[in-house]
């Protein structure tokens, strides 16, 4: 989580809903093993899509309000936002290919 | 990681010596695999043993499934890096091209076939030491990603897509390929047997619960957190462990059938992958 920008309740609306780019939000927790395992993947995806999409993180323990707002029941949960709307949800660990496919779909719908 | 280099010792021999030191009584090199979990650890090892970094995660992945693979492919050590890189791309292409691995046989959809061919052609281009730019990898990966459905063909698309990265950017790409390939094998088993993963798991859990209930009874409804430390709680725990042990030793018909089938299929396919890898690299038969 330390490699991804952490989003708070205060910054969520501006950084995620107000972003001009698709934003993949990683809802995770420091005590969660699969969440930690996902970090290198997400870091690679952030680098791959630099300037085209954003990848950020929300610590559910620090931001319970955000977790409640989006009905986060388990971690990791990944929400993809575009133009202020939630367009896709993925629950649990996933592969690099699947994350890329999520982001690619959001980019294609802009074309 | 420091390495003692004796005069005249080749990179291959140095690697074999390192593997021999890590090998336990059962022939496993778990201690080495544990020491190569992070990319920084792998980078140090790659440098110390003159192995191209992307091969390290590939070797660790193969070794974890087929013990002895690391040693079998030790001939990589010390070869020129462009040659090692080319061999890795040839191995990734082999998932599609090699009849023993047979990924191509799973794909009937003509559009998906064409997209897989396009992706594999890039690996063959890289294997011929012609540069492939990141935009090309992204293009084929995205095209395949659209077809990566939770079907057997979809998992084949995901497996090919998983390898479509600039390995300088993603040196662990082969691990991703193996992971998606494992998902494909699981899906094949489910489709062949008409199994649903959730339903099979529920059946197994029901058998476990029934075995425990038969041997140990049930936990009282009013049991609080301290019940497990009571005489009754400890007796329950003892009988539960006995029931689980008996279930493992003498499983009822159908118990764990999906898990067993997947385990056996994955192991068999990874044995084949290790043979194909050795063939690509030009190594001999398994050691020992």
Image (cartoon, coloured by chain):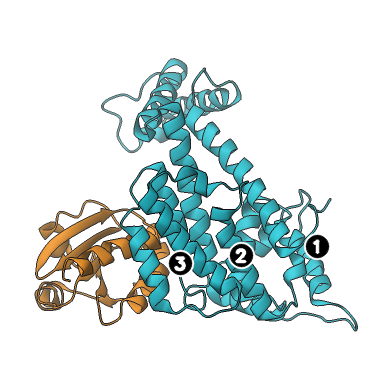
Q: In this rendering, would A68 be left or right of B146?
A: left
Q: Residues within 10 Å of mark 1 (few under 14, many from 20)?
A: some
Q: Nearer the viewer, mark 3 or mark 1?
A: 3
Q: Which residue is mark 2?
A: B90
Which hue is chain B drawn in? Answer: cyan
Mark 3 and mark 2 residues within 8 Å of each other at the beta carbon: no
Badge 3 and badge 2 both on one subunit = yes
Q: Chain of mark 2?
A: B
Q: In the rendering, at what x and y percent does residue A98 appear?
A: 34, 58
Q: Residues within 10 Å of mark 2 (few under 14, many from 20)?
A: many
Q: Chain of mark 1?
A: B
Label 2 element class: helix
Residue found at x 72% / y 57%: B279
Q: In the rendering, at what x and y percent does residue B116 appear?
A: 44, 57
As drawn, B227 above or below B161? above
| Disc marking residue B164 | 3
**Quarter of the C terminus of chain A within the rendering:** bottom left
Badge 1 and badge 2 both on one subunit = yes
Q: Residues within 10 Å of mark 3 (few under 14, many from 20)?
A: many
Sequence-earlier tag: 1 or 2 = 1
Q: Which residue is mark 1?
A: B20
Residue found at x 35% / y 45%: B150
Q: Nearer the viewer, mark 1 or mark 2?
A: 2
Q: Real-space Cα distance between discs 1 and 2?
A: 28 Å
**Quarter of the N terminus of chain A within the rendering:** bottom left
Q: Real-space Cα distance between discs 3 and 1?
A: 34 Å
As drawn, A101 above or below B27? below
């Amino acid at each position: 989580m330390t490699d991804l920008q952490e989003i708070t309740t205060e910054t969520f609306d501006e950084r995620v809903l107000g972003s001009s780019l698709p934003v993949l939000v990683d809802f995770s927790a420091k005590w969660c093993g699969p969440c930690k395992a996902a970090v290198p993947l997400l870091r690679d995806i952030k680098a791959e899509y630099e300037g085209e999409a954003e990848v950020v993180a929300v610590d559910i323990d620090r931001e319970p309000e955000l977790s409640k707002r989006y009905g986060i029941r388990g971690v990791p949960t990944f929400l993809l936002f575009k133009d202020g709307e939630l367009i896709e949800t993925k629950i649990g660990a996933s592969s690099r290919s699947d994350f890329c496919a999520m982001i690619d779909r959001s980019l294609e719908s802009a074309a | 990681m420091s390495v003692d280099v004796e005069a005249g010792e080749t990179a291959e021999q140095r690697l074999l010596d390192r593997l021999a030191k890590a090998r336990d009584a059962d022939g496993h090199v778990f201690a080495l695999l544990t020491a190569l979990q992070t990319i920084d650890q792998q980078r140090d090892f790659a440098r110390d043993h003159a192995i191209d970094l992307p091969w390290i995660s590939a070797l660790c992945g193969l070794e974890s499934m087929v013990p002895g693979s690391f040693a079998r492919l030790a001939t990589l050590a010390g070869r020129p890096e462009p040659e090692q890189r080319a061999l890795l791309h040839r191995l990734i292409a082999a998932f599609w091209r090699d009849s023993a691995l047979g990924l191509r046989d799973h794909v009937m959809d003509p559009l998906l076939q064409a997209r897989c061919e396009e992706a594999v052609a890039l690996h063959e281009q890289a294997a011929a030491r012609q540069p492939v730019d990141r935009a090309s990898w992204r293009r084929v990966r995205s095209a395949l990603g659209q077809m990566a459905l939770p079907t057997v063909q979809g998992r084949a698309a995901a497996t090919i897509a998983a390898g479509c990265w600039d390995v300088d950017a993603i040196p662990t790409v082969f691990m991703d390929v193996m992971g998606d390939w494992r998902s494909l094998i699981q899906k094949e088993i489910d489709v062949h047997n008409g199994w649903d993963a959730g339903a099979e798991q529920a059946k197994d859990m029901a058998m476990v619960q029934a075995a425990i209930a038969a041997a140990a009874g049930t936990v009282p409804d009013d049991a609080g957190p301290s019940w497990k430390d009571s005489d009754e709680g400890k007796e329950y725990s003892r009988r539960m462990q006995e029931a689980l042990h008996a279930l493992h030793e003498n499983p009822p018909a159908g118990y764990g059938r999906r898990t067993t089938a997947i385990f056996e299929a994955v192991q068999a396919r990874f044995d084949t992958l290790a043979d194909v890898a050795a063939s690509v690299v030009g190594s001999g038969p398994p050691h020992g």
